[in-house]
Structure formats: structure tokens, C-alpha cells
Amino acid sequence: MEKTIIIGSGPAGWTAGIYAARASLSPLLIEGLATQENQEKNRLPMGQIALTTEVENFPGFPPGDLGGYLDSAISKSRKNMLPPRDAGITGVSGPELVELIRAQAVHFGTRVVSDDIIDVDFSQLPYKLFGAAGNIYETQTVIIATGAVANFLGLESENRFKNHGVSACAVCDGALPRFRNKPLAVIGGGDAAVEEAEYLTKFTSKIYLIHRRDQLRASKIVVKRAMEHSAIEILWNRVPEEILGNDKDGVTGVRLKSTVGEPVLELAISGLFVAIGHTPNTEFLKGKLALTEKGFIARPIPFRTNTSVPGVFTAGDVADDYYRQAISAAATGCMAAINAERYLASL
Ligand SMILES: Cc1cc2nc3c(=O)[nH]c(=O)nc-3n(C[C@H](O)[C@H](O)[C@H](O)COP(=O)(O)OP(=O)(O)OC[C@H]3O[C@@H](n4cnc5c(N)ncnc54)[C@H](O)[C@@H]3O)c2cc1C
């Protein structure tokens, strides 16, 4: 039986691994499987941050030449698996960042298995985790760090321009030079979409907020602010039909169809932010512990990583539909491992 099993291999999971290993819990980390199905759902080992090219906001990585450091910190076989860096990246890339956190966790003794957890039994100790290929893992404590996947529109052209003008996170990407002082568009009608549009007004003076209905779902106060903001123009009853662009410039425009029979509209933009929600990876937890209305793991104690089940802790975006950053995920990974260590000590 394991002392601690961590499910998930993003910044939250690996950081939990660092702390749990250093606390002599000899953690086992289940990293997920790189199956076709997971790829289609954007739910691959190494997590969401590995889907992005440049990470400018993770503390400790200012622009600079990381070449020698990466060579010495990451094994050659793992380094060969990293995707080539995009030209022009001056700091750390997403895949490099999470590979470095992984290397640190493995260095301290975190053990890694590739598997997807498809079911759990938290009804009695030892807790049981059921893997996709039939393996059963038994453990005293669990840290769930399975993340949440950003929802996209599902257009082929959207896929083509991801990281080249299409983004799902204004806080992550809004400050990049490609978006500064350029017309941008945000898709969505909830609080998150309006907040993304407002956030982008720091970098540019023209943002189209595109919504498929004739009113926003966001709360009244947020809607009022958006409607009164001189940089935000709301386009009602519109949905993207195709994202326009080329290999050199990335996104250059978007073609919008009308949901109420108006003619097609083409906008010149340099960036499109998709803010239509996140899907937490919690299907295998339904009925096993408390989830929020949106399906994220509920944390009954404020500012703690406890779940509704004693000895089961959570970290990262799977329990966070608000901050959704690599650093906040890593921070809660640290907290969950400390919780697991203290829980075991108390038994
Ligand atoms: C395109 C993009 C760009 C971003 N850019 C930035 C940025 O610049 N800066 C920033 O701070 N944040 C950025 N973010 C947000 C950041 O990536 C996330 O906040 C962060 O990755 C969350 O970490 P996590 O460990 O909680 O979850 P994730 O990174 O999502 O990792 C979850 C892991 O769990 C695994 N998993 C899921 N289900 C199972 C299961 N059933 N069994 C086993 N394993 C499972 C997955 O394979 C995955 O490895 C970006 C996100 C995206 C999508």
C-alpha cells in the first residue's frame, strides 16, 4: 500500500511530488496516458501548460538563455522528447517549465506510472484507484491534481492558430507583444469572458466581445462595466465561422456568422481569446466526493486543500475555476502534500 498517490502530471501534481517526496512519503504519481482520445480532449500528460509556447509569468524565469541549464537539469532522453522551441522565445517554454518541475520531483524520489484513473473507491481504507488497463492502486492518502481543460470552439482554423493568435487565457497571454495595441476579440458571454475583455484593455484600445445571444450571462455589475467601457464593443448574436490568418502573422481576422439571419461579418483582429469555460477532469469522481455545481472538486475548508473525504486532497485547476494559473496550481500542490503529510502523521 502506498502512503500517497498523486493523480495528474501538471504543475500541481509535480509540485505535490516534490513536497511529498521531501517529506519521505515516497509518492507515486500517476501521470495520465497519451492516448488518441486524451489528445483529442487536450488532456495529455504534463498538463495544460505543456500546450503553450512561451510562459512569461512563472516566477524564476525571466528572459534569458536557458540552454545550458536545461541540458544539465533534464535527462537527455527526456529533453529529446520536448517539442522544438518556437523562434523568438526568450524565457521558458511551457513544455520546458513542466519538464523542469518533473525533474525536480523525480530527483527527490517521486515514482511515476503512466495510467488513467477511471474509478476510485474512497469508502474505506486503503483507498483504491482503478487504472484504465485494470491495475488497482491502494493508498492511504490521495492528491487529485487532474486539472481542467479549456473549452474551445472546435473549428479547424482555431486549432491551426493556437499559440499563434488564438488563446484561452488573457492573463497568461494578453501581455505578449503579438497582442499589444492590436484589435482583439473575446468569445463568450459569462463573467470570465467579460473579465478577459476588461483585462485586455490594459494592452489595447479595441476589443470585440462576441456573444451568440442578445444578452450576456455575466453578472449585472460586470455587464454594466463592459458596456460602458470605451475599448469594448459588444457584438450580439454572432458566432465565429472561421478564424483567418497566415503562417507568418498568425491570426489576422475572424469571420462571424449571425444567429439571427444577418449577413456574415468579417473583422480584422490580431488575436482571438476563447472564454467559453473549462471542463474539470472529474468524471471518475462523480458520486465519490463533493463536487461544485460546475463539476470542480469542492474544498469545504477555505484556503485548505481538503476535499469532502478525509485523506483525499486536491491541487490545481481541478478545484479552481477562478485563478487557473501554473503558479497557483503549483502552490496548491505544495499545500496538498503538506496536508497529506500531516494527515498521515495524525493517524
Ligand atoms: C494554451 C494555454 C496557455 C497557458 N499559458 C499559461 C501561462 O502562460 N502562464 C500560466 O501561469 N498559466 C498558463 N496556462 C494555465 C496553466 O496551464 C494551468 O493553470 C495549469 O497547467 C494547471 O495545472 P494543473 O496541474 O492543475 O493541471 P493540468 O496542467 O491540466 O494537468 C492535469 C494533469 O492531469 C492528468 N489527468 C487528467 N485526468 C487524469 C486521470 N483520470 N488519470 C490520470 N491523469 C489524469 C492530465 O494528463 C494532466 O497531466 C495556460 C493554459 C493553456 C491551456
Image (spheres, rainbow, N blue to C red):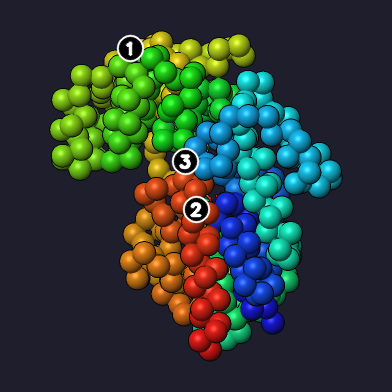
Q: Amino acid at mark 2?
A: Ala
The residue pinned by badge 2 equals: 329
- In percent of the image, x 55 and y 12: which residue is there? 249
Q: CA distance from mark 2 to mark 1?
A: 43 Å
Q: Quadrant of the N terminus?
A: bottom right
Quick check: can you spot residue 91?
yes
- Quick check: 208 left or right of 143? left
Residue 266 at what x, y percent from top left? Answer: 39, 11
Badge 1 crowding class, 10 Å Cα cut-off, few under 14, some 14 to 19, many 20 or more, is: few
Residue 21 at what x, y percent from top left? Answer: 66, 68
Q: Residue furthest right?
A: 77
Q: CA distance from mark 2 to mark 3?
A: 18 Å
Badge 2 crowding class, 10 Å Cα cut-off, few under 14, some 14 to 19, many 20 or more, is: many
- In percent of the image, x 59 and y 52: which residue is there? 10
- Quick check: 69 left or right of 224? right
The residue pinned by badge 1 equals: 263
- The residue tagged with tag 2: helix, strand or loop? helix
The mark lying in front, picked from 1 and 3, is 3
**12 and 197: which one is in front?**
12
Identify the image quadrant of residue 293. bottom left
Asked if disc 2 is less than 8 Å from ligand 1, the answer is yes
- Dot 2 or dot 3, earlier in sequence: 3
